[in-house]
Amino acid sequence: MTDSTTGGTTARTGLTRRALLGTAGAGLVVGAGVAGAVALERPTAGDGAGGGPALGAARVPFFGEHQAGILEPQQARVQLAAFDLSDGAGRDGLRGLLRRWSRTAARLTAGEPAEEFENQVALDAGPCSLTLTFGFGAALFDKAGLADHRPAALEPLPAFTGDALDPARGDGDLFVQIGADDALVAVHALRVLQRQAAGTASLRWQCAGFARTPGATPHPMTGRNLMGQIDGSNNPKPTDDGFATKVFAAAGGDQPAWTTGGSYLVFRRIRMLLDHWEALPVDRQERVVGRRKSDGAPLGTPAGAGEHAAVDLSAQDGDGALAIPSDAHIRVAAPASNGGAAMLRRGFSYHDGLLADGSPDAGLLFLAFQADPRQGFTPVQRKLSRGDGLSRFLRHEASGLYVVPPGAPQGGYVGQQLLDG
């Protein structure tokens, strides 16, 4: 839940019209902790009768300057997975796989069946705002004979206070984020990719998440996380000054030219200690986060101020104490407290039943896009892990860092700037 940081059918270049219309969406900064979503303008289930596309018919183009799934509206469902490149696959094997995956992604996002390994799972559905976003882990570059092209920003994340990471559920050579407004559409896409990868890459880990379904509220609004908090109010917006420089990589310094237009993605699986959290009175919960639970407004603002009211870190309550406590999440995570560090968060909730002790295995699949994790996630998470009151209710259990290549050129494939450059 990090309070700190941050589509149509034609080819995407720069910021899409839908992105420019958008507002920040749900995002828990949990120690960079609870990630956010981008809640942008999108069709709802009833739009078809009014002349606009129905929810299932909404399409997001695959080709463009940036990969889809970064700026577009957050979908209701997500499948996340990582693959490891097989021994001996090398650069040629990787190139062939990315070509197959890109052809498939272009067809599926257009609402067409896959050319190979089509299983009819999503036969009755439209594209449902399907996006497929691909990333490369650090180890991939050595395996593919591309060590000289590995970005310096892909250095391993440092260990943070309180981490309890399971390596089997993180990292990986190839990462894919599959978002859709229908669960079967997302699962279908993942299954096809997995079968197409056979012999070249094997599935390392997989997890599924969810967000609020479009049309579930009377009007578009920032979603809530499993703690019941409106989450993501301070996510950066595409209309903000300097937005692109915070989210997208550009050649220069130690950034390779092939990353231009790409981004860096931090993934964290963050379990929420919901039994402990829900035992707190609402006013205590609000002081831990620094926002009212009812409307998301910062503490110290008048009734009706709303979630987007300016945060006043100097505001005092009636007793002269800080309205937003010194260890409140929004104070510790604020860009002003972290040298302006920002990320575009696009997180999803998960709930995978109960653990052996009977507590919920539930929380946030934190996803944060940024131009350089050394200037974004790492400094913010370091501070959160040391001084954020919310950290007492969170456990970081898996992690991954990936460079997200720029979008595929029309008719090309993701990673072409690297592999054919």
Image (cartoon, grey):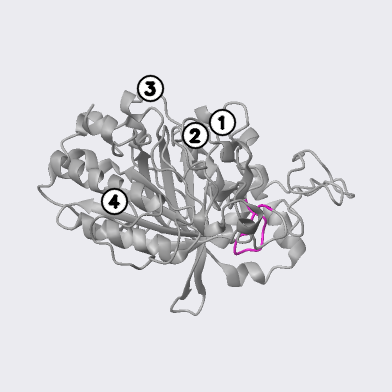
Q: Amino acid at mark 1?
A: Phe
User: Dots 2 and 1: beta carbons under 8 Å?
Assistant: yes
Who is closer to the viewer here, 73 or 236?
73
What secondary structure is the magenta-colored segment mainly?
A: loop
Q: Position of residue 381 (x, y in %)?
A: 51, 44
Who is closer to the viewer here, 135 or 98?
98
Q: Amino acid at mark 2?
A: Val
Above or below 119: residue 268: above
Q: Which mark is residue 251?
A: 3
- SS of the residue at dot 2? helix
Q: Position of residue 152 (x, y in %)?
A: 33, 30
In this view of the protein, can residue 166 be seen by the observer?
no
Label 1 Cα crowd, 10 Å radius (few <14 / some 14-19 / many 20+): some
Sequence-earlier tag: 3 or 1: 1
State how far apart marks 2 and 1 are (Cα): 6 Å
Q: Position of residue 149 (x, y in %)?
A: 24, 30
Sequence-earlier tag: 2 or 4: 4
Label 4 Cα crowd, 10 Å radius (few <14 / some 14-19 / many 20+): many
- SS of the residue at dot 3? loop
Q: Which residue is mark 4?
A: 172
Q: Which residues are magenta?
A: 220-231
Q: Position of residue 270 (x, y in %)?
A: 48, 58
Q: Which mark is residue 243?
A: 1
Q: Which residue is mark 2?
A: 247
Label 3 Cα crowd, 10 Å radius (few <14 / some 14-19 / many 20+): few
